Amino acid sequence: MPIFVFLIIMSAVAYLYFKTKQIRTPRPVEKMWHKSRAGMALGVGMGLVGLNTLFLFNFELASDLIFTYIIALLFMIIGFTSAVARFKAYKHYTPLLAQEEKDWAEFEKK
Protein backbone atom coordinates (compact mmCIF):
# COMPACT_ATOMS: atom_id res chain seq x y z
CA MET A 1 0.00 0.00 0.00
CA PRO A 2 1.46 3.33 -1.04
CA ILE A 3 0.36 5.11 2.14
CA PHE A 4 2.45 2.78 4.29
CA VAL A 5 5.48 3.32 2.06
CA PHE A 6 5.03 7.09 2.37
CA LEU A 7 4.70 6.86 6.16
CA ILE A 8 7.76 4.60 6.42
CA ILE A 9 9.82 7.10 4.41
CA MET A 10 8.53 10.00 6.54
CA SER A 11 9.43 8.17 9.75
CA ALA A 12 12.93 7.53 8.39
CA VAL A 13 13.30 11.23 7.56
CA ALA A 14 12.04 12.17 11.04
CA TYR A 15 14.50 9.73 12.61
CA LEU A 16 17.44 11.25 10.71
CA TYR A 17 16.28 14.78 11.56
CA PHE A 18 15.99 14.15 15.30
CA LYS A 19 19.23 12.15 15.39
CA THR A 20 21.04 15.07 13.75
CA LYS A 21 19.49 17.47 16.28
CA GLN A 22 20.64 15.15 19.08
CA ILE A 23 24.23 15.16 17.84
CA ARG A 24 24.38 18.93 17.37
CA THR A 25 23.10 20.10 20.76
CA PRO A 26 25.48 20.51 23.72
CA ARG A 27 22.76 20.23 26.39
CA PRO A 28 22.37 16.81 28.04
CA VAL A 29 18.61 16.87 28.66
CA GLU A 30 17.93 18.18 25.19
CA LYS A 31 20.06 15.34 23.81
CA MET A 32 17.90 12.80 25.64
CA TRP A 33 14.74 14.61 24.49
CA HIS A 34 15.79 14.41 20.84
CA LYS A 35 16.90 10.81 21.36
CA SER A 36 13.43 9.88 22.58
CA ARG A 37 11.80 11.61 19.61
CA ALA A 38 14.14 9.77 17.22
CA GLY A 39 13.29 6.49 18.95
CA MET A 40 9.58 7.17 18.49
CA ALA A 41 10.10 7.72 14.76
CA LEU A 42 12.20 4.57 14.46
CA GLY A 43 9.67 2.49 16.39
CA VAL A 44 6.76 3.71 14.28
CA GLY A 45 8.79 2.99 11.15
CA MET A 46 9.52 -0.56 12.27
CA GLY A 47 5.88 -1.16 13.13
CA LEU A 48 4.76 0.17 9.78
CA VAL A 49 7.21 -2.11 7.97
CA GLY A 50 5.61 -5.08 9.70
CA LEU A 51 2.11 -3.82 8.93
CA ASN A 52 3.03 -3.19 5.31
CA THR A 53 4.35 -6.74 5.04
CA LEU A 54 1.00 -8.10 6.16
CA PHE A 55 -0.84 -6.07 3.55
CA LEU A 56 1.76 -6.90 0.91
CA PHE A 57 0.84 -10.58 1.07
CA ASN A 58 -2.91 -9.89 1.51
CA PHE A 59 -3.24 -12.15 4.54
CA GLU A 60 -2.92 -15.31 2.43
CA LEU A 61 -3.02 -18.56 4.34
CA ALA A 62 -0.12 -20.51 2.92
CA SER A 63 2.30 -22.66 4.84
CA ASP A 64 5.32 -21.01 3.23
CA LEU A 65 4.16 -17.54 4.33
CA ILE A 66 3.80 -18.38 8.02
CA PHE A 67 7.43 -17.43 8.66
CA THR A 68 6.86 -14.09 6.91
CA TYR A 69 3.82 -13.38 9.08
CA ILE A 70 5.74 -14.24 12.25
CA ILE A 71 8.55 -11.85 11.32
CA ALA A 72 6.02 -9.13 10.41
CA LEU A 73 4.29 -9.62 13.75
CA LEU A 74 7.63 -9.35 15.57
CA PHE A 75 8.41 -6.11 13.71
CA MET A 76 5.03 -4.70 14.69
CA ILE A 77 5.32 -5.71 18.35
CA ILE A 78 8.89 -4.51 18.81
CA GLY A 79 8.37 -1.33 16.78
CA PHE A 80 5.19 -0.10 18.37
CA THR A 81 6.31 -1.13 21.87
CA SER A 82 9.52 0.81 21.37
CA ALA A 83 7.55 3.83 20.15
CA VAL A 84 5.35 3.75 23.25
CA ALA A 85 8.37 3.46 25.55
CA ARG A 86 10.09 6.36 23.80
CA PHE A 87 6.89 8.42 24.04
CA LYS A 88 6.95 7.92 27.81
CA ALA A 89 10.57 9.07 27.86
CA TYR A 90 9.61 12.09 25.74
CA LYS A 91 6.90 13.02 28.24
CA HIS A 92 9.41 12.59 31.08
CA TYR A 93 12.05 14.84 29.52
CA THR A 94 9.71 17.63 28.35
CA PRO A 95 9.39 19.39 31.76
CA LEU A 96 13.08 18.82 32.42
CA LEU A 97 13.86 20.49 29.11
CA ALA A 98 12.01 23.64 30.18
CA GLN A 99 14.04 23.73 33.40
CA GLU A 100 17.27 23.17 31.50
CA GLU A 101 16.36 25.97 29.10
CA LYS A 102 15.83 28.34 32.02
CA ASP A 103 19.10 27.29 33.68
CA TRP A 104 20.97 27.58 30.38
CA ALA A 105 19.64 31.12 29.84
CA GLU A 106 20.81 32.14 33.32
CA PHE A 107 24.22 30.61 32.61
CA GLU A 108 24.47 32.51 29.31
CA LYS A 109 23.77 35.83 31.07
CA LYS A 110 26.80 35.44 33.35
Image (tube, grey):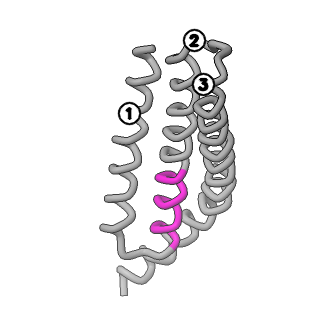
Instruction: Report the amino acid beneath label 2.
Output: Asn
Tell which circle, 2 or 3, labels the residue nearer the N-terminal end: 2
Disc 3 is placed on an element classified as helix
Rounded to the nearest angstrom, the CA distance separating label 1 from label 3 is: 28 Å
Looking at the image, which residue is at 40% across and 48% down?
15
Nearer to us in this view, 60 or 52: 60
Report the residue at 38% width, 58% height from top.
19
How far apart are the two marked residues, 2 and 3, measured between alpha carbons?
Answer: 11 Å
Viewer-nearest of discs 1 and 3: 3
Numbered tag placed on residue 58 in the rendering: 2
Q: Is residue 31 above or below residue 75?
A: below
Q: Amino acid at mark 3?
A: Leu
The quarter of the picture where residue 104 lies is bottom left
Q: Could you say where residue 55 lies in the image, as x and y percent from the top left?
A: 55, 17
Mark 1 burial class by Cα count in 10 Å: few <14, some 14-19, many 20+: some
In the picture, the disc for residue 65 is 3
40 to 99, vertically: above or below: above
| Picture layout, residue 98 above or below residue 109 | above
Measured as percent of width and height from the top left, residue 106 is found at 45, 79
Q: Position of residue 75 (x, y in %)?
A: 59, 41
Q: Earlier in the sequence, mark 1 or mark 3?
A: 1
Where does the magenta region start and end? Answer: 29-39
What label sits on residue 10 in the rendered view?
1
